[in-house]
Amino acid sequence: MCWMKIFAKELKDTLRDRRTIMMMIVMPVVMIPLLITVVVKIQVSQVERAQENQLRIAFIGGAHAPELLTLFQRDDGFFIVETVPEDTAVAMTAGEELDGVVVVPESFPATIAQDRQGEIRIIFKSSEAYGVARSKLEDVIEAFSRQIVTDRIARFNLDENLFDAISIQKTDISSAQEKLAEAAGGWLPYLFVIFSFMGAMYPGLDLGAGEKERGTLETLLSSPASRLEIVVGKFLVVMLAGIATALIAMMGVYLTVQQFPEIPSDVFDIIMDMLGPKMILMIFSLLLPVTAFFAAVILGLSIYARSFKEAQSIITPLNIAIIFPAIIGTLPGIELNAKTALVPILNVSLATKDMLAGTVNPLYLTEVYASLFLLAGMSIFWCVKWFNREETLFRN
């Protein structure tokens, strides 16, 4: 069959192209483990550094709460500045000369003496150092508050439970797998979709616009193969490149997770189960029609373009159109339902999240598959019609 010969010929040419090999193999194998490892290591390092750093804080009104001032002074995590006016301290915090400010009003001792609730103000910059300054300031002040409450209880000979009328027993019925799926289920499909598009892009550009520039498209058209067979052969190569890149990206994630020995064994077992052969096949079944859609659109636009450069300028902005619905799938509160199951790419993200959690609705999943395969079929039909137009193939 001619389309198989076209497929074999185009596949051989594609595998000779260094840019394609870079996008298909080197990028996902090298970049994904490197990216995940670097991001995790940097974040952990930054949090640890922020926790260990000595915070420089201004303490205003220390005479009104000497016990609280003593607690801060005894804590090695703070360097206390006591002689800074409040306005200056706020400006210094905004300019990052101070990490925070504690303000005790003059009325505080009298309020506490009357067994009422006193007020202490803290000033901080939440955008700095992962909010460590706020949490550390709150910890010390809460410890001071517990001292006051304990003193009141002892003075009035009261039962401690009097101040806790209700004890909230928290029971989280979410399984560990559901929690992990909620955390990772949003960005994993986003990662796979992006790499399937990137993997299909360069072969699609080369097999359309690239052949026009090299002048080999006319030779191919003069062969015994029909135009439908030529399109099918090229389309299958582009789709195969996209699928291969996505699968290699999955392998990269799998191998990267194994490089973190600090993951608890029970959590590690759940992650390995989520990334097992069964789950990979289910995700692959979703990526197959999506990649077919990408391949058909990229190949059609590449055939339309006059040159490789023009094809790049047309296809590259499609990244934004793909990223937008994929990012929406990572937002909390966005769930797979009868409407979102019809939105391309978004439905892949949401369905993958539910698959990883083991809570996918079969009805919605069927709707996702139907919409994806319909979209893929329409895009392939459009690509074939586009290739059959002389004004498209030989556009000047």
Image (spheres, rainbow, N blue to C red):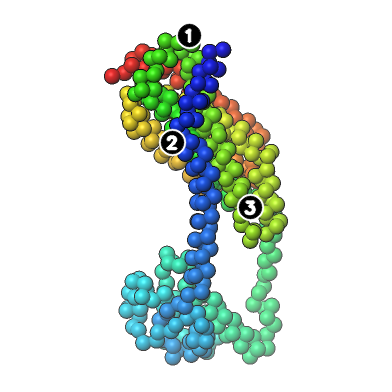
Please, is residue 254 above or below residue 162 in the view?
Answer: above
Q: Which residue is mark 2?
A: 19
Q: Residues within 10 Å of mark 1 (few under 14, many from 20)?
A: few
Which amino acid is tagged 3?
A: Gln
Residue type at mark 2: give it.
Answer: Arg
Three-letter code for the amino acid on which mark 1 is drawn: Pro
Residue 222, given in percent of the width and then of the height, sits at 42, 10
Estimate the spatial distance between the alpha carbons at disc 1 and disc 3, rounded to whole Å: 51 Å
The numbered dot on residue 224 is 1
- The CA distance from mark 2 to mark 1 is 30 Å
Query: Mark 3 — residue?
Result: 258
- The residue shown at (45%, 10%) is 223
Can see residue 132? no
Return the mark for residue 241. none
Circle nearer the N terminus (2, 1)? 2
Vertical placement of 161 versus 9: above or below? below
Image: 281 above or below 268? above
